[in-house]
Amino acid sequence: MPAHNIDSTDWKILEQLQRNGRMPNVELAEAVNLSPSPCLARVKRLERQNVIARYVALLDPPAVGLGVSVFVQVRLERQVEASLNRFEAAVTARPEVMECYLMTGSSDYLLRVAVADLDEFQRFVTGFLARIAGVNGIQSSFALKQVKYQTALPLNLAPGYTNRD
């Protein structure tokens, strides 16, 4: 269930902004059949409610020299609060860690790491990741090819989605 009361016009705004976060308000208003002032008020409300968390520019990793993407499974010695907090604080501070998830199954965490090359990844593992107290195992998988990458959420699958026209 959505945390906020999102109506069909809000869903339309969110869909448009996921496609183009830099869309001028006048164009956005036209796309969702509102006048500019009420459209901007809705966007500001969605921002205040953290439905819209932030705006970003999505960069092409190889174009900026960070073409190696590695998925890293990490096991901890024990899943106790202090160990979990220590690990999470450590990886949160590292810029090459793009995503980190606490998992069920055979590993405790799954990381997505972006680096320039294998040497940089080796330094990340041996100089940082393996040195975090409580880390018991590390397994890495290198992405050979990105088949699909999507940042827009599938809003039509969200509970309460009402933009079915």
Image: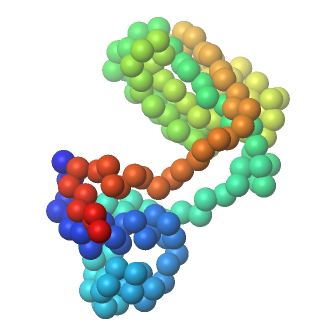
Spot occupied by residue 64 in the image (x, y as percentages of width and height): 77, 54
Residue 57, quarter of the rendered image: bottom right
Spot occupied by residue 101 in the image (x, y as percentages of width and height): 45, 31
In percent of the image, x 60 and y 44: which residue is there? 148
Residue 83 in sight from this viewpoint: no
Quarter of the picture holding the C terminus:
bottom left
In percent of the image, x 31 and y 60: which residue is there? 51
Spot occupied by residue 140 in the image (x, y as percentages of width and height): 65, 21
Spot occupied by residue 72 in the image (x, y as percentages of width and height): 60, 25
Image vertical order of residue 164 relative to residue 39, above or below: above
In percent of the image, x 62 and y 16: which residue is there? 139
Left or right: where 89 falls relative to 119 = left
Q: How is the image coloured?
A: rainbow
- Front residue of 133 and 9: 9
Residue 151 in sight from this viewpoint: yes
In percent of the image, x 43 and y 70: which residue is there? 16
Left or right: where 138 falls relative to 155 = right
